[in-house]
Image (spheres, rainbow, N blue to C red):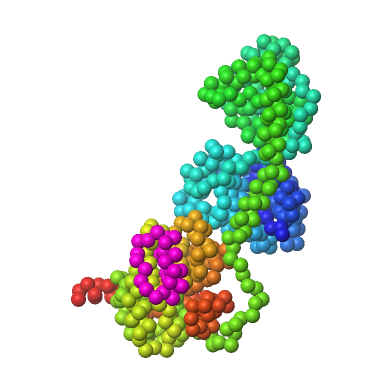
């Protein structure tokens, strides 16, 4: 079964660009594999914008949707995406209901960055150039972006290394992709093609020197980028040197298919070198070329003078390029997308509720007693106050101790008491274990803490997973343990910033995780400020079943008020 995939390009779809060629080739081959693929991009054509708006109104069902006019995008730009374009992007993501949102060059202030930041789908990011990694400038914004990306890709080891400095993670290196039918060996003539860049003048001069000794050969200086200047042609070579501009693959194909030798520019496009390889050209790119451009001329001369060497390298280049086609690229992405899709927990839509005949109760899954080092609430007082507040069930989750839960279990109360513990892990935040039978020591690795909870038949409840005011697990750790997290806390009434709760809700929705809520109360007045409305339960299994139909209840009070009460209680304890 195919997936709904959204590919987002930051560059105008109406203009030639190497990123757009990568996206377009990948999109076509993914469709051939049975996926529904929509490309989102800006455009400079009015007809594209009209068609894009019509597609959004029709439910975002189109191969390409132009979301708005294109703005200049570069590593130095700080121009925000216009409000209207942001609105179109939000509408496209909402109506498209994509399984995968794949942004290209999200290190630019562009649609790609916004799509990955705002999407609730699984996110994939591809970086194609080390020169496009300047955004967002702030570390918190980069951390938020990274937490929403499920896979990091780069088109070369050099790009992966540069990207990992700003967005640390495990990068998979993919190739640029090439159309092996468009680029194929034709009858070769004595033609050298050199990708021109203004910074590559020393390389051009070295090829000029060798060309004077090769009277039967021609040289074409190929411009693949706009505003790249015009090279100077010596008068003695004016009949054998020409300049061509070809910014897309279709325009370059005829030239490269006939070329016998290709010389990459010092800052040239990887895509063009791959196209030349697919066309069966020998490539003059010796080691150390950037440091010593004159080596390019020597390598060109050697290939021009040795027919057997040139033809052999051309055949080898063609074989290598045939393993890097868009079809192969799409197969790699297909495997990646399907692997990511398996991270989502299976939902049970339309199933009967076995607890539908039970009463609804209010359950607070996160609270503390005087057994915690930072709380002064005695267990009997907590139970009495919870009953007064109308709660039907509570979880006692003291910091790194289990005594408060045992005391509450032994007390006489109308509440259903869930014995728990909030356990500090070794550098990856805290984990709550519910339905425990004994205390779990603090300081264990995250993985071992989860295992210790499950060994007791307990429930892993992850509290405030994105509260950056405290130590929390990083996004990579969360994704590695998705199958072991039973409940994710999507509302904690004590968080300073509501955005942290919203991030948790986004994460839980994205992966289909069961949602929980709690007050994290450290004073009596905080009890019940965050809770769940759920069916009455009597044991662990019924609790998990009841969570399927539970609703988050938000009853917030002033955090400053609650925190001041906590500080006052702690000060009183110290005086004693």
In the rendered structure, the answer to whether residue 573 lies left or right of residue 392 reads left
Q: Is residue 447 magenta?
A: yes
- Left or right, 77 with reference to 69: left
Viewer-closest of 6 and 78: 6
State the image quarter where residue 230 is shown. Answer: top right
Residue 401: percent from left, percent from top: 33, 71
Is residue 23 highlighted in magenta? Answer: no
The residue depicted at 57 percent of the width and 78 percent of the height is 549
Above or below residue 286? Residue 535 is: below
Identify which residue, 230 or 185, lies in the foreground.
Answer: 185
Q: Looking at the image, which residue is at 64% across and 14% down?
A: 210
Query: Residue at (51%, 69%) from the top-left corner?
Result: 486
Residue drawn where x is 65% and y is 40% of the image: 176
Q: Is residue 59 above or below residue 386?
A: above
Q: Is residue 308 above or below residue 366?
A: above
Screen quadrant of the N terminus: bottom right
| Magenta range | 430-458
Give the residue at the far left of this rendering. Answer: 576
Which image quadrant for residue 120? bottom right
Image spot of residue 2 (x, y percent): 71, 57
- Residue 389, by quadrant, is bottom left
Give the number of callouts: 0
Q: Is residue 564 visible?
A: no
Q: Is residue 426 visible?
A: yes
Q: Residue furthest right?
A: 187
Most extreme residue toward the front is: 455
Q: Out of 307 and 58, give the one closest to the viewer.
A: 307
Image location (x, y in percent) of residue 501: 49, 66
Indicate the position of residue 82 as horizontal and vertical percent values.
61, 53
- In the visual, does 311 lie left or right of 128? right
The answer to whether residue 359 is above or below residue 261 is below
Q: Quadrant of the C terminus?
A: bottom left
């Amino acid at each position: 079964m195919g997936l709904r995939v959204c590919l987002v390009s930051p560059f105008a779809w109406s203009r030639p660009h190497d990123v757009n060629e990568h996206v377009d080739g990948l999109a076509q081959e993914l469709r051939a594999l049975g996926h529904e693929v929509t490309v989102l991009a800006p455009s400079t054509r009015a007809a594209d914008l009209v068609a894009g708006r019509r597609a959004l109104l029709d439910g975002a069902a189109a191969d390409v949707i132009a979301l708005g006019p294109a703005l200049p995008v570069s590593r130095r730009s700080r121009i925000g995406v216009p409000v209207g374009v942001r609105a179109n992007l939000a509408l496209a993501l909402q109506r498209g209901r994509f399984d995968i949102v794949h942004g290209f060059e999200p290190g630019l202030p562009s649609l790609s960055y916004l799509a990955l930041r705002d999407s609730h789908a699984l996110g994939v990011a591809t970086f194609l150039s080390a020169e496009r990694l300047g955004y967002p400038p702030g570390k918190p914004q980069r951390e938020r972006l990274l937490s929403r990306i499920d896979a990091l890709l780069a088109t070369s080891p050099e790009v992966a290394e540069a990207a990992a400095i700003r967005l640390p993670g495990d990068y998979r290196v993919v190739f640029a992709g090439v159309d092996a039918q468009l680029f194929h060996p034709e009858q070769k003539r004595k033609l050298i093609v050199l990708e021109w860049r203004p910074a590559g003048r020393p390389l051009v001069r070295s090829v000029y020197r060798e060309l004077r000794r090769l009277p039967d050969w021609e040289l074409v200086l190929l411009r693949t980028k706009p505003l790249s200047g015009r090279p100077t042609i010596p008068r003695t070579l004016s009949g054998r040197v020409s300049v061509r501009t070809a910014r897309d693959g279709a325009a370059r194909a005829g030239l490269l298919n006939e070329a016998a030798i290709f010389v990459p520019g010092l800052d040239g496009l990887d895509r063009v070198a791959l196209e030349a390889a697919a066309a069966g050209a020998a490539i003059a790119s010796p080691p150390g070329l950037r440091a010593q451009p004159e080596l390019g001329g020597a390598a060109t001369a050697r290939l021009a003078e040795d027919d057997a060497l040139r033809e052999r390298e051309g055949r080898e280049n063609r074989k290598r390029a045939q393993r890097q086609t868009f079809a192969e690229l799409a197969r790699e992405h297909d495997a990646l997308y399907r692997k990511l899709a398996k991270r989502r927990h299976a939902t049970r839509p339309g199933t009967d509720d076995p607890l539908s005949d039970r009463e609804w109760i209010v359950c607070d899954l996160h609270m503390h007693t005087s057994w915690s080092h930072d709380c002064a609430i005695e267990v009997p007082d907590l139970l009495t106050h919870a009953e007064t507040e109308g709660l039907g069930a509570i979880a006692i989750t003291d910091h790194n101790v289990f005594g408060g839960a045992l005391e509450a279990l032994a007390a006489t109360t109308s509440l259903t008491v869930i014995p728990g513990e909030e356990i500090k892990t070794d550098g990856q935040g805290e984990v709550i274990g519910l339905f425990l039978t004994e205390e779990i020591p603090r300081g264990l690795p995250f993985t071992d803490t989860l295992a210790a909870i499950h060994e007791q038949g307990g429930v892993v409840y992850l509290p405030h997973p994105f509260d950056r005011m405290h130590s929390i697990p990083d996004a990579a750790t969360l994704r590695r343990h998705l199958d072991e997290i039973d409940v994710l806390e999507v509302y904690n009434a004590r968080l300073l910033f509501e955005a942290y709760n919203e991030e948790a809700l986004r994460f839980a929705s994205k992966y289909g995780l069961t949602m929980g809520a709690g007050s994290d109360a450290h004073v009596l007045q905080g009890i019940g400020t965050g809770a769940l409305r759920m069916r009455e339960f009597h044991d662990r299994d019924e609790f998990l079943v009841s969570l399927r139909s539970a609703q988050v209840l938000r009853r917030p009070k002033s955090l400053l008020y609650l925190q001041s009460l906590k500080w006052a209680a702690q000060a009183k304890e110290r005086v004693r």
